[in-house]
């Protein structure tokens, strides 16, 4: 059976750090996750790449610069298949709509032209919602897009 893993601990542009230094350290990890991607076998593993944002947009004050497409390109360059695991209930774009249709359109745009993208996953992040609970109300709009 194929294994699907979230990208963040394997992505040098996310939590796996590109420098391999203590500054790349991640919560409850002794040291850096740098190089963790070396264990990903493209014959057995697909990557669920999450955190979609627009690299061409200026960073939101107080937030790190977006490197989402860089991560997609990194895994594609290692011949890993990917599923974009975006989420409708968050948008790093101030003023952008937060609904399933808009999220699917943004994610498709961000991943356009990246080889090996197999699909898209509707993902909800409870802490982005007013009551702190997952909300699947936008799933149909996302799927139809």
Image (cartoon, grey):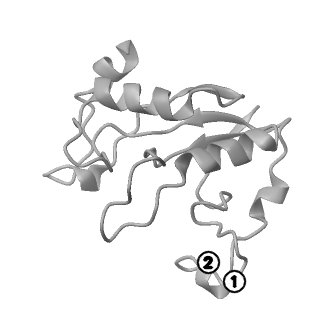
> Residue 1 at what x, y percent from top left?
76, 31
Circles 1 and 2: CB atoms closer than 8 Å: yes
- Return the residue at label 1: 21
Q: Residue at x 73, y 77 (%)?
A: 20
The quadrant in which residue 112 appears is: top right
Q: Is residue 113 visible?
A: yes
- Return the residue at label 2: 24
> Looking at the image, which is closer to me, 78 or 4?
78
Q: In screen coordinates, is 42 left or right of 106?
A: right
Q: Which residue is drawn at 71% across and 28% down?
A: 115
Is residue 77 shown above or below 118?
below
> Looking at the image, which is closer to me, 22 or 62?
62
Is residue 20 shown above or below 40?
below
Mark drawn on residue 45: none
> Residue 136 at what x, y percent from top left?
27, 32
Crowding at dot 2, Cα within 10 Å, few <14 / some 14-19 / many 20+, comes out as: some
Q: In screen coordinates, is 85 left or right of 57?
A: right
Q: Is mark 2 on a helix, strand or loop?
A: helix
> Residue 67 at what x, y percent from top left?
54, 54
Q: Number of labelled discs?
A: 2
Is residue 125 shown above or below 83?
below
Is residue 79 shown above or below 115?
below
Q: Disc 1 and disc 2: Cα gap in Å?
A: 5 Å
> Looking at the image, which is closer to me, 83 or 111?
111
Q: Which residue is drawn at 35% across and 32% down?
A: 103
């Amino acid at each position: 059976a194929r294994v699907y893993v979230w990208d963040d601990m394997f992505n040098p542009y996310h939590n796996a750090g590109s420098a391999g230094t203590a500054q790349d350290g991640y919560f409850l990890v002794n040291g850096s996750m740098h190089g963790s991607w070396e264990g990903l076998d493209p014959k057995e593993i697909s990557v669920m790449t999450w955190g979609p944002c627009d690299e061409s947009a200026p960073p939101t004050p107080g937030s790190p610069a977006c490197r989402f497409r860089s991560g997609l390109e990194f895994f594609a360059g290692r011949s890993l298949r990917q599923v974009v695991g975006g989420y409708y209930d968050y948008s790093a774009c101030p003023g952008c709509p937060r609904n399933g249709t808009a999220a699917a359109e943004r994610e498709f745009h961000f991943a356009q032209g990246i080889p090996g993208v197999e699909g898209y996953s509707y993902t909800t992040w409870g802490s982005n919602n007013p009551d702190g609970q997952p909300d699947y109300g936008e799933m149909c709009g996302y799927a139809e897009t």
